[in-house]
Amino acid sequence: MDRKVIIIPTYNEKENIEKIIRAVFSLEGRYHVLVIEDGSPDGTGSIVRKLQEEFPDRLFMIERAGKQGLGTAYITGFKWAVAHEYDYIFEMDADFSHNPEDVPRLYAACAEEGADLAIGSRYCNGISVINWPIGRVIMSYFASVFVRKVLAVDIFDSTAGFKCYKRKVLETIDLDNIRMKGYGFQIEMKYTAYRLGFKIKEVPIIFVDRKEGSSKMSSSIFGEAFWGVIGMRFRKFKGRKN
């Protein structure tokens, strides 16, 4: 059986973390979960530690000293997952904006349909976002349009954070050379995979804004992404292996 792990970064997710873990473990296919916990003062880490007693072989956690950025959280998780020889490695938010029931669809896109990277896409079939303010929808949608035009890459949802990688993609990308730390990280990882020749497939999903807890989005995240995309346009990309 393929070994599959879902990486979930957390900061102050006490309202959601137990529910999202149990939802993942209820899926068919025996998924594992790795939580990257950035020192949440609300006790998120304590909740995960308690759940580890119930799921000692499926639930893992790396605790870090404070908020260090979404990108560094995922890179920490990627390195752990590759070292532990997982075949398929997922990214997913803790807040149910990504529906756990869509996880098997991303897996199937890679395991059965030939993709190396599957993206849970909000924009490949129009706009599929629920409960976001209209201003945020417009900003997110046109950010992806901007990326598609500047980088000449045929990805409709370049900022998506719901993904499945085959292990070989993360083994090939030089993770230490990924520069962006915030949501621009999502763009950089997709573009790097594209430039290295991996097959990317977008799987349509419906994105629902969180019901509990607070968003970690800030204006500085968009600034980093804008200038990062401009910089990527002129960079050369090399993998660690071929």
Image: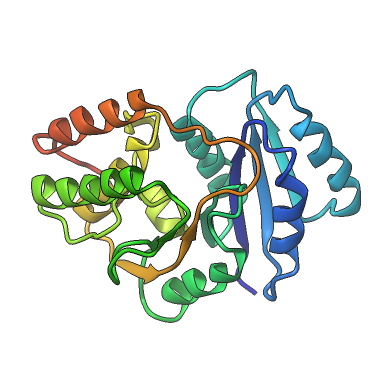
State left or right for residue 228 relative to residue 91.
left
* Location of residue 63 (image quadrant): top right
Instruction: Reply above or below: 25 against 72.
Output: below
Residue 240 seen in the current view? no
Most distant residue in the top direction? 65
Most distant residue in the bottom direction? 112
- Residue drawn at x 69%, y 26% is 40
Q: Position of residue 17 (x, y in %)?
A: 72, 45
Instruction: Reply above or below: 140 against 129.
Output: above
- Residue drawn at x 52%, y 62% is 88
* Location of residue 66 (image quadrant): top right
Q: Position of residue 204 (x, y in %)?
A: 38, 70
- Count of marks placed on residues: 0
Residue in the foreground of this view, choosing between 32 and 142: 142
Residue in the foreground of this view, choosing between 61 and 128: 128
Residue in the foreground of this view, choosing between 138 and 223: 138
Query: Which quadrant of the figure contains the N terminus?
Result: bottom right
Q: Position of residue 27 (x, y in %)?
A: 69, 71
- Residue drawn at x 19%, y 28% is 227
Most distant residue in the front direction? 134
Residue in the foreground of this view, choosing between 178 and 104: 104
Q: Position of residue 98 (x, y in %)?
A: 53, 58
State left or right for residue 119 relative to residue 212.
left
Colouring mode (rainbow / by chain / secondary structure / one colour): rainbow
Residue 15 seen in the current view? yes
